[in-house]
């Protein structure tokens, strides 16, 4: 599918692809609550419209087996599952995002 070249914050017209998406996502510093909006990122090669997909999870589950199963699925997505991102039309997560997400996952019980 054809995509429009969009002018980014640096004044450069950028096509939507894996490289420009990665550049945009890696420009964001996640806050403590891990909720970030990527609005017109500053990177010279950043595509201006990129965002994350979020998962909202409880910190405590009544059934420990539920917590363990959920954590296993999310850990897979953050580790091995990242290798499938591009093929599925997603941008692999930057290393700092994976690290922050893994730390947050350790707080779930």
Image (cartoon, grey):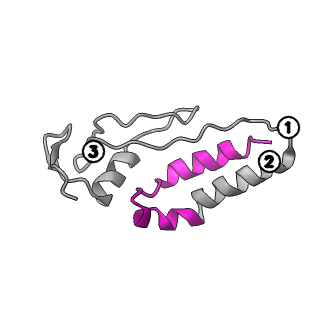
Q: Provide the residue span drawn in magenta.
A: 80-109
Q: Quadrant of residue 89?
A: bottom left
- Crowding near pointer 3: few (<14 within 10 Å), some, many (20+)? some
- Crowding near pointer 2: few (<14 within 10 Å), some, many (20+)? few
User: 84 above or below 72?
Assistant: below
Q: Residue at (39%, 42%) from the top-left corner?
A: 51
Pointer 1 residue: 62
Measured Cα–Cα span from mark 3 to mark 2: 40 Å
Q: Residue at (18%, 57%) from the top-left corner?
A: 2
Pointer 3 residue: 43
Horizontal side of residue 104 vs 63, given as left or right: left
User: 51 above or below 81?
Assistant: above
Measured Cα–Cα span from mark 1 to mark 3: 43 Å
Q: Position of residue 84 (x, y in %)?
A: 49, 66
Viewer-proximal residue among 57 and 21: 57
Q: Position of residue 105 (x, y in %)?
A: 69, 46
- Secondary-structure class at tag 2: helix
Pointer 2 residue: 66
Q: Residue at (43%, 62%) from the top-left corner?
A: 88
> Would you say residue 103 sits in the magenta stretch?
yes
Measured Cα–Cα span from mark 2 to mark 1: 8 Å
Contact? badges 1 and 3 (CB < 8 Å)? no
Q: Position of residue 4 (x, y in %)?
A: 16, 49
- Crowding near pointer 1: few (<14 within 10 Å), some, many (20+)? few
Horizontal side of residue 7 vs 30, given as left or right: left
- How many callouts does the rendering have? 3
Q: Position of residue 70 (x, y in %)?
A: 72, 50
């Amino acid at each position: 599918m054809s995509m429009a070249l969009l002018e980014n914050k640096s004044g450069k017209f950028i096509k939507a692809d894996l490289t420009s998406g990665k550049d945009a996502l890696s420009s964001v510093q996640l806050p403590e609550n891990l909720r970030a909006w990527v609005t017109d990122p500053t990177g010279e090669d950043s595509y201006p419209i990129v965002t994350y997909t979020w998962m909202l999870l409880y910190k405590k589950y009544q059934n420990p087996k539920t917590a363990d199963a959920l954590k296993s699925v999310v850990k897979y997505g953050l580790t091995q599952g990242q290798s499938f991102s591009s093929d599925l039309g997603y941008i692999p997560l930057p290393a700092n995002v994976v690290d922050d997400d893994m730390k947050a996952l350790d707080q779930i019980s």
